Image (cartoon, helix red, strand yellow):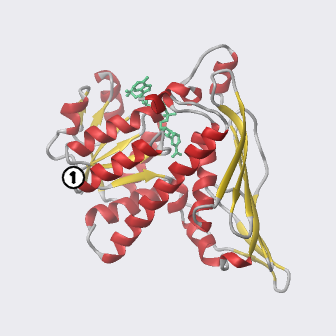
Amino acid sequence: MIQLGIIGTNWITHQYVQAALETKKYALYAVYSRRLETAQTFANEYEGEVLCETDLETFVSLPALEVIYIASPNSLHFSQAKAAILAGKHVIVEKPAFSNPKEMAEILELSQEKQVLFFEAARNIHEESFKKIAQVLPEKDQIIGANFSYMKYSSRYDQVLAGQEPNIFSPKFSGGSLSDLGIYAVYAALGWFGKPEAVHHFARKIATGVDGIGTVILRYANFDVTIQHGKIGESFLSSEIYLDKGTLWMNAVNAIEKAELHDRQTGVTALDIQVEENPMVEEAYDFAEIIEAPETPENKKRYEEWTVLARDVNQVLFDMRKQAEIHFAADEE
Ligand SMILES: NC(=O)c1ccc[n+]([C@@H]2O[C@H](COP(=O)([O-])OP(=O)(O)OC[C@H]3O[C@@H](n4cnc5c(N)ncnc54)[C@H](OP(=O)(O)O)[C@@H]3O)[C@@H](O)[C@H]2O)c1
């Protein structure tokens, strides 16, 4: 069993721990929180003895602890991951893993030096639906475009309207729509088509200084991908990839439940997609496979692909953010 520790005690961490336990490859070993009572309340929901810590150094240094899942506000990921890696632990860092390319480069270098693994928890690229779509995509010269949409109203925007600055909309915590939702569409585009030749991002800032809604164009050699992202409104649009021979339709670009290939010659074929009830099971399983056998050629290749993708997504997000003149406190550090 992989001994799992967690940082951040919100609902997403419960979802990850439940997914990890469902794989039967992890045991919840320790919980870190700023408050002991919060850690204990979290731990009490799980069977067996779970250690609770409020001091980060003590937590990351627990000898039996093997991997730490980090789901704190975005800007804290870097210092927490760094502390964990220096203590010799693998890290699974929620998206967006880091605020800028400087942080990403330091973590990639340090994890290599310390011989530990870094995973960005970009769950959509681990879902079966994502892989099925990759399998049916033709060569890039037969793709003529794509249109992705991910826009969901955040109830925390109500707090912004009331004059507050919740973490998810705060430049201090590296928040905003692109960081929170747009990243899934960027991961999909780079995962399916590779790194674009150029990026263009037009965003509308909200009172806190981060983006509330935005439009992206990713330019590839022979096609463009447009992305609509937002957290201050709701979209009901599906997503599509346009091909020479027809259209690949998806109900969404993240957590895809339905996809159809509309071929002008042969008609409509639905892709056979099974959806996990807990959307984090597939990534938890994938990470466990690498942790258990990092040296097999197949696992080395998968890990290399994920880290290159994480680095490229981080760079593209940074370039987009700069174009939209959105500044994070982390950039000054
Ligand atoms: N993959 C997904 O589907 C998904 C979904 C939602 C969120 N996420 C990601 O998960 C991460 C956490 O998001 P969230 O919305 O849960 O964030 P959040 O509510 O702002 O904070 C998460 C946890 O971090 C700690 N925390 C909060 N404010 C803090 C502060 N000022 N200083 C230090 N620690 C603080 C708290 O834990 P303690 O009180 O125990 O210290 C809290 O439970 C983000 O990176 C987000 O992008 C991913």
Q: Residue at x 38, y 38 (%)?
A: 78
Q: Residue at x 33, y 41 (%)?
A: 81
Give the number of callouts: 1
Q: Which quadrant holds the C terminus?
A: top left
- Among the 4 quarters of the image, the one containing residue 61: top left
Judge from the rendering whether residue 329 lies leftward or rightward of residue 289; answer left or right.
Answer: right
Which residue appears at 26% of the width and 38% of the height?
Answer: 83
- Residue positioned most to the right: 264
Q: Position of residue 245 (x, y in %)?
A: 80, 80
Does 297 sit above or below residue 164?
below
Q: Foreground residue, 25 or 331?
A: 331
Pointer 1 residue: 114
Residue 22, image x and y in percent? Answer: 39, 56
Q: Quadrant of the N terminus?
A: bottom left
Would you say 191 lies left or right of 249 here? left
Looking at the rendered structure, the secondary structure element under dot 1 is loop
What amino acid type is highlighted by mark number 1? Lys
Determine if residue 86 is in view: yes
